[in-house]
Image: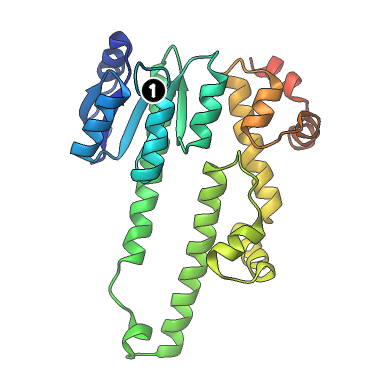
């Protein structure tokens, strides 16, 4: 059962979140709450949570500093940032420091539940991957059985894991200038081979799926926030708003402003 810590200096927000969720019913365990970043960090050191809900604006050590420490020392902890509509710079920094998701104030239970469900799905995915990687040696490794078949299965499993990891990085780091060649270097494979493997496993090429991830996140920001269009463009990895608008219209069939008016 994943352990959760909540950090927010506004006690009514903190208590509201605690009371709004039936933690055990959703397979979660609330293990602590804190009113500032320093207390939260102390709880993290003591309790090793899986999930951290934190406000970006806190006295003393704020959310930005806490996220920076988490990224350095506890990168496996998944963070959900609580941010106000006007806190664009905080939200940008939260994404840059590896926050998994965010919920806007005033916190609404359905949006908070959706964020928690996404986090739990990610934890389950990671646990599944750990299970695959931590299994006992197979016949190819021990020298028994049909070595050729076992080696082939092992290679296929590793290839699938590489693509799965790349897709997860794309979903979580869509604001960064990711490239297939960088992933090829990371996993020590030929870039052309990785391109073919990626298309085979996902049915899409790398650039198309990267664009899809960014546009889906842009649609979410347009629906859930009041950020300016150029701010959303930057948050999803497009520094040039004009280019972002062209890509968005090609993918969605309307401009970001048209989409905002239709869904807002």
Compared with 35, 253 (above or below) is below
Pointer 1 local density, CA inside 10 Å: few below 14, some 14–19, many at least 20? some
Quadrant hosting residue 44: top left
Q: Which x, y percent locates residue 179? A: 66, 54
The answer to whether residue 166 of the structure is visible from this angle is: yes
Residue in the foreground of this view, choosing between 17 and 98: 98
Residue in the foreground of this view, choosing between 55 and 198: 55
Quadrant hosting residue 8: top left
Q: Which x, y percent locates residue 26? A: 28, 32
What residue is at 72 percent from the left and 34 percent from the top? 239
Quadrant including the C terminus: top right
In the rendered image, which residue does mark 1 sit on? 62
- Kind of element beneath mark 1: loop
Q: Name the image colouring.
A: rainbow
Quadrant including the N terminus: top left
256 lies left or right of 100:
right
């Amino acid at each position: 059962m994943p352990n959760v810590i909540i950090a927010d200096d506004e006690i009514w927000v903190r208590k509201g979140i605690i009371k709004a969720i039936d933690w055990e019913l959703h397979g979660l365990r609330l293990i602590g709450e804190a009113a500032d970043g320093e207390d939260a960090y102390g709880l993290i050191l003591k309790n090793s949570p899986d999930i951290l809900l934190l406000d970006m604006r806190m006295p003393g050590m704020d959310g930005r500093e806490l996220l920076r420490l988490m990224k350095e020392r506890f990168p496996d902890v998944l963070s959900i940032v609580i941010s106000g509509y006007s806190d664009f710079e905080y939200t940008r920094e939260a994404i840059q420091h590896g926050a998994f998701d965010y919920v806007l104030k005033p916190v609404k239970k359905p949006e908070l539940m959706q964020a928690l469900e996404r986090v739990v799905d990610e934890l389950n995915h990671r646990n599944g991957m750990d299970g695959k990687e931590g299994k006992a040696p197979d016949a190819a490794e021990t020298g028994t059985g049909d070595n050729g078949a076992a080696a082939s299965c092992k290679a296929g499993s590793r290839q699938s894991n590489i693509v799965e990891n790349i897709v997860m990085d794309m979903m979580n780091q869509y604001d960064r200038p990711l490239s297939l060649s960088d992933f090829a270097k990371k996993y020590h494979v030929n870039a052309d081979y990785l391109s073919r493997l990626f298309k085979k496993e996902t049915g899409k090429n790398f650039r198309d799926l990267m664009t899809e991830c960014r546009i889906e996140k842009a649609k979410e920001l347009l629906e859930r926030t009041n950020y300016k269009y150029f701010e959303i463009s930057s948050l999803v990895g497009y520094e040039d708003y004009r280019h972002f608008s062209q890509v968005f219209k090609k993918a969605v069939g309307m401009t970001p402003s048209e989409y905002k008016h239709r869904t807002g």
